[in-house]
Each structure stands twice: as structure tokens, then as C-alpha cells.
Amino acid sequence: MSDYLNELFGLKDQVAVVIGGTGVLCGRMAHALAGAGAFVVVAGRNGEKGKERVEAIEAEGGKATFLAVDASSRESIAKLCESVESAHGPVDILINGAGVNSATPYFEIPDDEWDKILGTNLRALHQACQIFGEKMTARGKGSIINVGSVTTDRPLSKVFAYAASKAAVLNYSQNVAREFGSKGVRVNCVSPGFFPAEQNRKILSPERVAKILERTPMGRFGEPHELDGAVLLLASDKAGAFVNGANIFVDGGFTAMSI
């Protein structure tokens, strides 16, 4: 990397927390941050996957550790924040990527499923923004990246609660960006299109895949590493210095498609 690009996108000596970093897409985001020089805390429930992710990052020359968190628990998120700051110093970058999905037919969606999806995808994100954001705004520095979806732009069939939660994530992020902007903290969204993530595989029939590809100008699913650029732009306090309240779609043109 040239000195110019390193200055623009480098994250040396910064501490990043990736909630949901044990998953496919947020795990890749953790790789991107570590590759740019940040020390990355991979946070999630699955210790085995977390350890594998850390080992993969270290094998590439990055620095990372795993910390367990239950993203649905305010107490667990607060403990995560305290543990990171105690061991590694103030958090510069937070990615909120914990998420769940379901394709339960509309009239069959039980209240507990609806609450779980909204709780994980929206309430947990709000709690993390509060807890980490309070520390960041007190320091006058930080970047929060909330993981949205193409459903922030338009609803998708068969995933009612998920679509509603992700649309709310964008609105919420823009409101928090307005709240935090004057305090030196930027809040943005990165919204993936269709990637080979575990929660997508569970609901993708051959027919649904065909419909998705028909509406994706690039004619394929994304690869996790194709999220790297958007994440580094939003994380960097140089390249993304004036980017606040934005939503970057990484979707192969899916949200640009009409007829």
C-alpha cells in the first residue's frame, strides 16, 4: 500500500469491536479492519467460531482476540465494552452486525419470533450504540458502522420481521448520526445485498435465487471480501471524515433495478 493510501485508509493503533464477528460477513469485516492495522475484538456467542476467526486473522498478520457477548443483553454488551477498554484501550470503531432472520409465512409468525428478530437486529444495536457511543462521544472521536440490508431500501418478500428491522436500522442510524455528529462521532450503515451468509442459505430456494439474480445487474451473489472497501471507508477518520448518516449499498446493483 502506498504511503498516501495507508494514510487515507490505515487504522494503525486503533481498536475495533465487531459484534457479530463470528458470522460470515461480519467476520470478513473483522479481517478488513485488521488488515488495515486495527486491533480487532471479534465478539459473538460462538467461541469456537470466534477462535477460528481470530486464528485466520493472525495467520494473515493481523492482531485480534475473541470476547464472548450476548448481543441481546444490555449487561453483556456493557461488560464487553468494559473488558475491551480495560485490556486494550478506548474503542475507536464499532461494527454492529449481530442479526437473525426467518422465512415463516406471514400469518404464522409467532410473537416470540417477531420479538427475537426485532430484539436482535434493532434493540441490541441500539443498546450497543448507547453503551459504546457514550464512551466515544465523551472522547470526541469514533466511528459506528451499523449493518443494514437491501431491505433498508425496499421490502423483500418472505422475511417480514427481518425487513422491518433493517428498515428501522437505517432510520435509527440516521437519527443517531445527527445526535453524535456534533460530538465527533460518525454513524453510518453498510447494507449488503445477497451474499453466501448462513442466514441467507436457510431461506434460498432455487426459484428465489433465480429471481434475485434476475434483479441483480451483475448477475451473481457477492463475495464477503467485496465488503472490505465500504467498511474501510466508513471506519477511517481520514477517508470517511465527512461521511455521516450515510448508507452504502454493496449489492451488485440490486437496489438500482426496476424493470
Image (tube, rainbow, N blue to C red):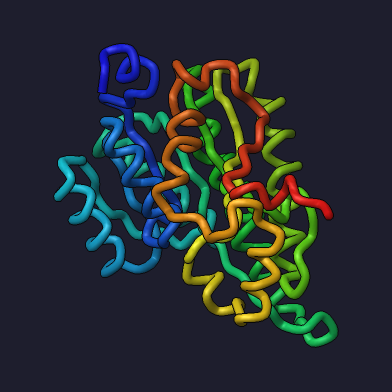
Determine which quarter of the picture holds residue 124. bottom right
Farthest top residue in view: 4
- Image position of 94 with respect to 117: above or below: above
- Residue 56: where, in percent of width, then height? 21, 55
Residue at position x 69%, y 48% in the image: 169
Q: Nearer the viewer, residue 96 or 157?
A: 157
- Residue 17: where, in percent of width, then height? 39, 43
Q: Nearer the viewer, residue 175 or 76?
A: 175
Q: Is residue 214 visible?
A: yes
Residue at position x 55%, y 79% in the image: 202
- Image position of 213 with respect to 171: above or below: below
Q: Nearer the viewer, residue 158 or 138?
A: 158
- Residue 228: where, in percent of width, then height? 42, 41
Specify the quadrant that holds the N terminus.
top left
Residue at position x 72%, y 71% in the image: 159
Q: How many labels were placed on the picture? A: 0
Specify the quadrant that holds the C terminus.
bottom right
Residue at position x 31%, y 46% in the image: 31
- Residue 173: where, in percent of width, then height? 67, 39
Left or right of 162 on screen, residue 220: left
Determine which quarter of the picture holds residue 215. bottom right
Q: Can residue 125 be seen in this view?
A: no
Farthest bottom residue in view: 108
